[in-house]
Amino acid sequence: MTIIVHHLENSRSQRILWMLEELGLPYEVKRYARDPKTMLAPRELRAVHPLGKSPLIEDDGLVIAETGAIIEYLVGKGDGRLGPPAHREAMQRWRFWLHYAEGSLMPPLFVLLVLSRIPVMGKAAVKRFRPMVDRHLDYVESELARSPWFAGEQMTAADIIMSFPLEAARSRAGLDERRPATIAWLERIHARPAYQAALAKGGPYAYA
């Protein structure tokens, strides 16, 4: 069965296309455009899942939401490829980054991005909030200085799920050459053929 990806432009679901390309699994993309005024997902996504958010995938009648859950499902579909390494420490690192991306890094980063768009009062709030984001970016930098990929010596799904917040940080939250290990990691993922193929199929993606 071909997996259907309900893909919203400029969104976290780009990671799912990348993962499917890395795994070589057949899939079909159903694209959705954001509302040009609100930048929110269209109501049509609610017909697929009550939350009306992307990413969503359908596989043989099963609808799966949430990036982390989708990634774990696809690891199973891919016979364990891109899943946790066999070594215990690397396995724990894989599991940690899979949850850290959305659970710890993305919330303060999202708040910072929103505050940066609010005139006057937003600027004052950013000054108080940026140190929290910087702490996370410094932590990521220290970990990538230890190994080329988040779970060790090989690229895994941990790198895929970490791509969106770090691309967003590179684009709008101050991630730059002062954190060379993270910049080098971004360059490595952008050079991967599967990443580039996913971009071609996914359409507009402002963070790439």
Image: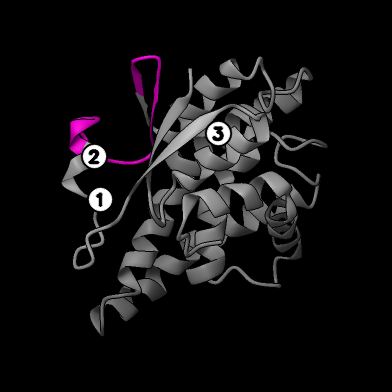
Question: Does label 3 or label 2 sit earlier along the sequence?
Answer: 2
Question: In the current view of this chain or complex, which residue is farthest to the bottom?
Answer: 120
Q: Are the residues flagged by discs 1 and 2 in contact, CB closer than 8 Å?
A: yes
**For the residue carrying disc 1, how many other residues have a C-alpha within 10 Å: few (<14), some (14-19), or many (20+)?**
some
Q: Are the residues flagged by discs 3 and 1 in contact, CB closer than 8 Å?
A: no
Is 48 a magenta residue? yes
Q: Is residue 41 above or below residue 20?
A: below
Identify the element where label 3 is drawn: helix
Identify the element where label 1 is drawn: loop
Pointer 2: what residue?
A: 45
**For the residue carrying disc 3, how many other residues have a C-alpha within 10 Å: few (<14), some (14-19), or many (20+)?**
many
Pair 3/1: label in front: 1
Identify the element where label 2 is drawn: helix
Spot occupied by residue 35 in the image (x, y as percentages of width and height): 22, 60
The reply to whether residue 64 is in sight is yes
The residue range painted magenta reads 46-63
Give the Cα distance between marks 3 and 2. Answer: 25 Å
Nearest the eye: 142 or 194: 194
Give the Cα distance between marks 3 and 1. Answer: 24 Å
Spot occupied by residue 152 in the image (x, y as percentages of width and height): 78, 36
Pointer 1: what residue?
A: 41
Pointer 3: what residue?
A: 98
Name the residue rendered at 69%, 23% in the picture: 81
